[in-house]
Amino acid sequence: MRITKLFILLILITSCSNSSEQDNNNTPEVEILKNIKTLNNNKHKTPIINFKKFANSGADKSITLSKKNIASSLTKAKEYKYCIITVGTHTIVKVLDLKNCKQSGSWGTCMPLAEGYIKKGALKYKKDFINNIIGLPDNQDRTMYLFN
């Protein structure tokens, strides 16, 4: 009888720890990796800032983007499942297709198709090539977060 109770207790402890791990994998920030449109459903007032906090500790790799390193960074992104780029605290894009790209004169490389949000008061959805979402190369903080 005592062994049965211990066995049941062990099963309960194991199932509780597994469900908490699953809950951590379904945070709003993780959902953004899968579908950027969930950012608009986020109840937080600062979803882009919250994503950046998550990404700074959770991304497999992060790269500060500039005109000099954008081409090599996009090549590196091909090794990862998800590529998210933020500009300051006002823009976030998810690269959809690294092969579907359009040459950008200002960035000097082929810029891939992406979708994301620009915060202008409210979040404004945009699907376009990333150069048309992240703007011209300048001194703004642009960070690429790579996840597997």
Image: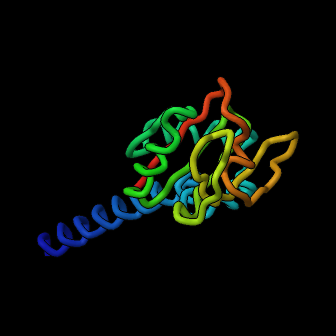
Q: Is residue 41 above or below residue 76?
A: below
Give the camera-side residue of 128 and 17: 128
Judge left or right: residue 145 versus residue 101: left
| The N terminus - image quarter | bottom left
Find residue 86 and report its image quarter: top right
User: Residue 93 or 37: which is nearer the viewer?
Assistant: 93
Quarter of the image where one finds residue 114: bottom right
In-front residue for pair 91/24:
91
Q: Position of residue 43 (x, y in %)?
A: 73, 50
User: Which residue is at 73% across, 47% downward?
Assistant: 133
Query: Would you place residue 29 above or below residue 89 in this image?
Result: below
67 relative to 126 in the view: left or right:
left
The C terminus sits in image quarter: bottom left
Q: Is residue 64 left or right of residue 130?
A: left
Q: Position of residue 98 (x, y in %)?
A: 53, 60
Whether residue 17 appears in this view of the structure is yes
Measured as percent of width and height from the top left, residue 78 is found at 42, 57
Residue at image position (79%, 42%) is 119
Q: Residue at x 12, y 71 (%)?
A: 3
From where the camera sits, is residue 47 visible? no
Q: Residue at x 45, y 38 (%)?
A: 62
Query: Please, which colouring scheme is shown?
Result: rainbow
Check the image and report above or below for 35 versus 109. Answer: below
Q: Residue furthest top?
A: 139
Expressed as whole percent of the image width and height from the top left, the position of residue 145 reads 49, 44
